[in-house]
Image (cartoon, rainbow, N blue to C red):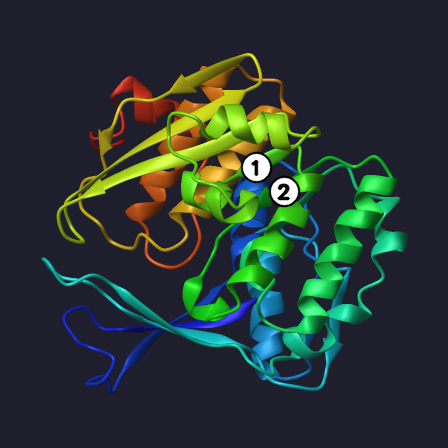
């Protein structure tokens, strides 16, 4: 988890004097979405033993997420800063995560003991480049879960600014995560990097299922945008013997697109766990992703009924 600080709309980071504060984090966002859909979820992380760590714990509890396995240590809370886009100027993010309590102490998490109580395990690639401790912890986590027969989902969430020039290391570590995943959230570019060959939208699914024997679902999105406030989104769900792609859907007014992929992942995982059809998985994921774009902060806050209403055309009216 980390602290998110937004510059006010229309203000560049270099000009900012005031920031809106949110608690963020990819896995925590997915956990919150699953909790909202009725799942019992535990978040495993390391937080500093400070007031900011307390803030994160309170945020997790408010979202219905268990904190039994959150470690507290000395250190700082990582953060990131957001500059909202406007017109042709894209949004921008600056990370400040080096030396955080999580980056320094993630290798203290006892994954083998946790695997016995798990039903599903989800992780994000955004943590892999933070430190040798976080990458080692992720590798031990997938090894422990795989050994215990626990299904694993992996969202690549590749961040070039965090990897820097460590291109080969990124490909190696992301490939190891993909090898363990039954559900993979990845783009053609992610697969190209991991497989070391050209992958495009047409051959992505075929190559993914040929390369990763454990893989059951490959999930990706297409985002078209003309500036930060004129966007559409579609979602594709592939299995080894079928696929479903939603129509490109306008997202409407963009309040905050950060976390939309995590909301989409939560709704898709909910559908997979419930044995939903490919169409149901894709439509629920798309609904959650777009609805999140209309909500400030990192998290989708909503209900299963709202996901259903999205595709029935009810959502645009006033509910009385």
Q: Look at the picture and state if 94 lies above or below 32.
A: below
Closest to the camera, between mark 2 and mark 1, is 2
Residue 248 appears in the picture as rendered: yes
| Res 184 label | 1
Using the image as rendered, state which of residue 78 and residue 41 is in the foreground.
78
> Residue 239: where, in percent of width, then height?
55, 20
> Residue 198: where, in percent of width, then height?
43, 39
Q: How many marks?
A: 2
Asked if the residues shown at circle 2 and circle 1 are in contact, with their CB atoms under 8 angstroms apart, the answer is: yes
* Residue reaching furthest to the front: 197
The quarter in which the C terminus is drawn is top left
| Res 119 label | none
* Residue reaching furthest to the left: 87
| Res 178 label | 2
> Residue 12: where, in percent of width, then height?
19, 77
The answer to which image quadrant residue 313 occupies is top left
> Looking at the image, which residue is at 62% across and 75% down?
54
Work out how far the residue at label 2 is from the one at label 1, CA to CA, in angstroms. 7 Å
Residue 67 appears in the picture as rendered: no
> Residue 150: where, in percent of width, then height?
79, 37
In the visual, does 248 lie left or right of 178?
A: left
Give neighbour class at mark 2: few <14, some 14-19, many 20+ (Cα, 10 Å): many
Helix, strand or loop under label 1: strand
The quarter in which the N terminus is drawn is bottom right
In the visual, does 249 lie left or right of 72?
A: left
Helix, strand or loop under label 2: helix
> Looking at the image, which residue is at 89% across and 44% down?
116
> Looking at the image, which residue is at 72% across and 38% down?
120
């Amino acid at each position: 988890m980390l602290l998110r600080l937004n510059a006010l709309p229309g203000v560049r980071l270099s000009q900012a004097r005031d920031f809106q504060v949110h608690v963020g984090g990819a896995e925590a966002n997915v956990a919150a979405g699953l909790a909202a859909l009725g799942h019992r979820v535990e978040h495993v992380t390391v937080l500093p033993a400070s007031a900011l760590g307390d803030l994160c714990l309170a945020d997790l509890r408010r979202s219905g997420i268990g904190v039994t396995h959150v470690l507290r240590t000395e250190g700082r809370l990582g953060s990131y800063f957001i500059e909202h886009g406007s017109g042709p100027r894209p949004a921008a993010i600056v990370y400040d995560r080096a030396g955080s309590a999580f980056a320094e102490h993630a290798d203290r998490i006892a994954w083998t003991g946790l695997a016995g109580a798990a039903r599903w395990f989800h992780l994000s690639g955004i943590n892999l480049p933070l430190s040798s401790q976080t990458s080692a912890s992720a590798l031990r986590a997938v090894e422990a879960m795989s050994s215990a027969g626990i299904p694993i989902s992996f969202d690549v969430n590749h961040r070039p600014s965090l990897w820097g020039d460590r291109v080969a290391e990124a490909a190696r570590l992301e490939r190891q995560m993909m090898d363990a995943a039954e559900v993979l959230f990845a783009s053609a570019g992610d697969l190209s990097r991991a497989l070391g060959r050209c992958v495009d939208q047409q051959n992505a699914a075929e190559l993914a299922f040929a390369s990763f024997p454990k893989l059951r679902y490959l999930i990706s999105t297409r985002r078209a945008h003309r500036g930060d406030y004129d966007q559409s989104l579609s979602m594709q769900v592939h299995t080894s013997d079928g696929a479903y792609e939603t129509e490109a859907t306008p997202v409407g007014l963009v309040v905050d697109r950060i976390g939309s992929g995590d909301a989409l992942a939560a709704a898709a995982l909910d559908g997979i766990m419930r044995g939903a059809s490919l169409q149901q998985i894709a439509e629920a994921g798309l609904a959650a992703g777009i609805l999140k774009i209309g909500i400030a902060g990192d998290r989708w806050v909503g209900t299963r009924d709202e996901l259903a209403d999205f595709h029935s055309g009810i959502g645009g009216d006033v509910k009385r």
